Image: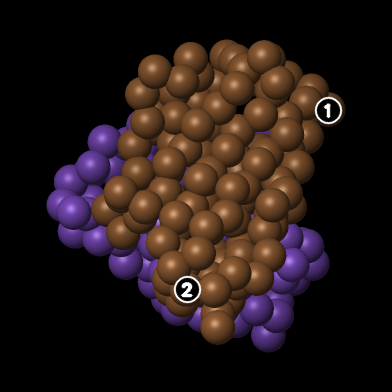
Amino acid sequence: EVQLVESGGGLVQPGGSLRLSCGASGFLFGGYWMSWVRQAPGRGPEWVAHIRDDGSTSTHVESVRGRFIISRDNAKNSLYLQMNNLRAEDTAVYYCAREIVGGLVDLDYWGQGTLVTVSS
Amino acid sequence: EIVLTQSPGTLSLSPGERATLSCRASQSVTSHSLAWYHQKPGQPPRLLIYGASNRATGIPDRFSGGGSGTDFTLTISRLEPEDFAVYYCQQSSTFGPGTKVEIK
């Protein structure tokens, strides 16, 4: 059974940092592109970033470029999102998700999400 | 940047009825990058259709997708109680604003 479990969310002050993790199981993690998607309260999903199966390439949405970095460790079946210089508008539930077709951001499995709240 | 528009904003229907949801892109997109999801409160989105017309694993055949260019459609042939949710279309990294399908 495919499982994705996010962790690392919490309350952080504006300008602070957090590192989110996503543990994967039930599939060959190193064979899939992976994404982070966030959803602010009462809003629709917003794609944040994705990374190639071997970790060699990544893309971030413009609103987080230069502040967030997606990475992965295939030996540990883990995906990460380093978030720096956080802003109030980054408050959201953050999901990790698997891409069914690498690079196309069609997301067939999602975790349950971890809540990030940016507030003073 | 491509903008997706979904209509209607809310669709009020009864179980057993047919639902037709529309997704329009601001410019022509490739069908293989068009997907549909639904989301229930407190849950992550669930992939229904990818590549405009391919059902994801475990999705019943009452769900079907079609369209090309700038206009795409998700059809639910007969609504089941578990189908009442918010539906999002997605083109690559862009999600639409959603259509809420509610019980009439």
**Residue under circle 2?**
A14
Q: Earlier in the sequence, mark 1 or mark 2?
A: 1
The hue of chain A in the figure is brown
Give percent across and percent down for residue B67.
34, 45
In the rendered image, residue A41, in percent from the top left (x then y), is placed at 58, 76
For the residues marked 1 and 2, what is the alpha-carbon distance in whole angstroms?
38 Å
* In the rendered image, residues at marks 1 and 2 fall on the same chain: yes
Q: Which residue is rendered at x = 55% and y = 21% of the image?
A: A32
Q: Residue at x 65, y 71 (%)?
A: A11
- Mark 1 lies on a secondary structure that is loop
Chain at numbered mark 2? A
In this rendering, would B61 be left or right of B49?
right
Question: Is residue B13 among the parts visible in the rendering?
Answer: no
Q: Quadrant of residue A80?
A: top right
Q: Residues within 10 Å of mark 2 (few under 14, many from 20)?
A: some
Q: Please state the horizontal and vertical placement of residue B13, each as a whole percent of the image.
A: 63, 77
Position of B77 with respect to B23 (left or right) is right
Percent coordinates x, y for residue A72 in the rendering: 55, 27
x 79%, y 23%: residue:
A26
Mark 1 neighbour class, 10 Å CA radius: few under 14, some 14 to 19, many 20 or more: few
The image quadrant of residue A46 is bottom left
Q: Which mark is residue A98?
A: none
> What's the colour scheme?
by chain
Q: Is residue B30 visible?
A: yes
Of all residues, the one furthest to the right in this rendering is: A1
Pointer 1: what residue?
A1
What hue represents chain B?
Answer: purple
Indicate the amino acid at tag 2.
Answer: Pro
